[in-house]
Image (cartoon, helix red, strand yellow):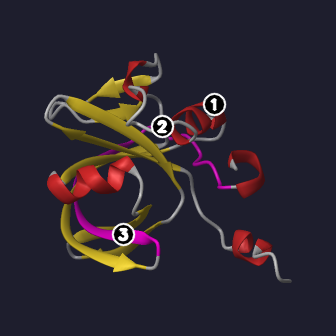
């Protein structure tokens, strides 16, 4: 195959990254996220270098991750198709805000609060290694990423 569809066979979840810089908040749909440590709990998330979220996370280390549940496709599309530079995606009814003012998606399968510990450049993406500071689950089944649905 020469069209890279084989990369879509790698299984991934669907996540929404919540970030804030001052009073400006943003949400971004992501699929490239993985756990990298259990002591302490750490994750690695890849964000396109040109995305507004990459810019924010380089300046403000706290961010949220909403692990979307099956049935939250509308939320995934709403947070992934429009740049946060152009519109405030946090004004939608499915969004909430935690005690630190970080935006998140209500009723997601899980919620994590994270802090960036290291940043790496990899091709056209920034890789953010982060410690998971806290989290909770609601018992819903996580959504699985399907490139044909979201792009």
Q: Which residue is drawn at 35% across and 71% down?
A: 127
Q: Of circles 2 and 1, which is in front?
A: 1
Q: Can residue 76 be seen in this view?
A: yes
Q: Disc 3 marks which residue?
A: 126
In the structure shown, which secondary structural element does the residue marked by tag 2 occupy?
A: loop
The quarter of the displayed image where residue 4 is located = bottom right
Residue 68: percent from left, percent from top: 53, 43
Residue farthest bottom in this picture: 1
Local crowd size for mark 1, using a 10 Å CA cut-off: few (<14), some (14–19), many (≥20): few
Residue labelled with disc 1: 74
Residue 91, by quadrant, is: top left
Q: Is residue 72 left or right of residue 29?
A: right
Q: Distance between the residues labelled 3 and 1?
A: 26 Å
- In the rendered image, the vertical position of residue 142 relative to residue 115, given as above or below: above
Counting from the top left corner in percent of width and height, residue 10 is at: 67, 73
Q: Is label 2 or label 3 in front?
A: 3
Measure how far apart labels 2 and 1 are at the Cα level. 12 Å
* Contact flag, marks 2 and 1 (Cβ < 8 Å): no
């Amino acid at each position: 195959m020469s069209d890279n569809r084989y990369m879509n066979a790698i299984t991934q979840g669907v996540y929404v990254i919540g970030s804030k810089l001052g009073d400006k908040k943003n949400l971004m749909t992501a699929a490239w996220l993985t756990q990298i440590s259990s002591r302490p709990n750490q994750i690695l998330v890849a964000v396109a270098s040109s995305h507004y979220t990459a810019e924010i996370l380089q300046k403000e280390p706290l961010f949220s991750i909403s692990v979307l549940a099956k049935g939250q496709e509308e939320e995934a599309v709403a947070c992934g198709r429009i740049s946060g530079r152009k519109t405030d995606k946090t004004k939608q009814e499915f969004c909430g805000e935690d005690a630190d003012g970080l935006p998140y998606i209500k009723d997601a399968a899980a919620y994590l609060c994270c802090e960036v510990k290291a940043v790496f450049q990899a091709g056209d993406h920034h890789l953010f290694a982060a410690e998971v500071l806290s989290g909770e689950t609601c018992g819903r089944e996580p959504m699985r990423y399907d490139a044909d649905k979201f792009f």
